[in-house]
Amino acid sequence: MDARVIELEIRNDVSEIEGVVERVRQECEEMRFARTQLMLNLPVALTEALSNAILRGNQDDPRKCVRVHARIDMSVLIVDVMDEGAGFDLDACLTDPTTQDRLHREDGRGLFLMQKLMDRVERFAGSPGPGGKGGAGNVVRLTLRRAS
Amino acid sequence: MSFTTKKQDGVVIMEIEGQLIVGNRQELKQKMLEELEKGGRKFLIDFDKTGYIDSSGLGVLVSLSKKIREQGGDLRLANLNEDLRTLFELTKLDTLFQIAETREQALASF
């Protein structure tokens, strides 16, 4: 089966997240990704990446947008989530939310879940936003190898 | 996505249909806190019809649990599917919440 490519540009609004997740999930289902990957790994990790882009990268600014590029084939999903923010140090932001002192906190599980649920999570500088607006941009790349 | 509130044997039961994520977590929080303000002290969240939960959704559950405990109440969870259980285990939130297999077991545990 040929690889599928999804290119999306969404408003900087968390209400857009479910639609993107469902679109990518449908393609992964076509490629026969495992049920748990379709029901847990992909939706949770992609939701985290998108909400980070919208709320942190783009600082909830409705004038900004988020771009998504996903490539899916029979062996792997690679999805890039691009915002217009200044970026962040992935390793520096990664804390363990399961320690006793952090377990009762409301926040701090997003990056942790991405790391746990994906085979690989990377961050790097992206291209400028649409029309050259915004900063250099920030890309979070999620990689999930297909399990059968 | 919808939240449905029911009451049974003095327990406020919240059913979550669909996802519990960043876009709707505040709605759940508001509905639960309204019940707490009205005097509810025993709470059960039923995940039988729930899809997936993100970190924001988990965070709201932690926050609600704390607020309910501060008012002398109790929050129990029930009907987590295998994927949701995995999520709670990954984050060790299975150690923070009382999780029952079924709604009936949860109700009986109050």
Image (cartoon, coloured by chain):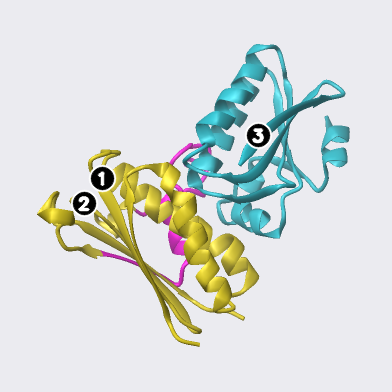
Q: Which residue is tagged 1?
A: A58
Colour seen for chain B: cyan
Q: Compute the Cα span from label 2 to label 1.
A: 6 Å
Asked if B104 appears above or below A76 in the picture, the reply is above
Residue A72's x, y, as percent? 44, 76
Image quadrant containing the N terminus of chain B: top right
Segment colored magenta: A94-123
Tell me which secondary structure the magenta stretch mostly adopts: loop
Which residue is the extreme one toward the bottom? A1
In front: A112, or A148?
A148
A102 relative to B80 in the view: left or right? left
The residue under the point 39% across, 48% down is: A51
The residue under the point 54% across, 63% down is: A41
User: What chain letter is assigned to the residue under label 1?
Assistant: A
Colour seen for chain A: yellow
Residue B59 falls within the magenta-colored stretch: no
Secondary structure category for the residue under label 1: loop
Q: Compute the Cα span from label 3 to label 2.
A: 34 Å
Residue A56's x, y, as percent? 30, 44
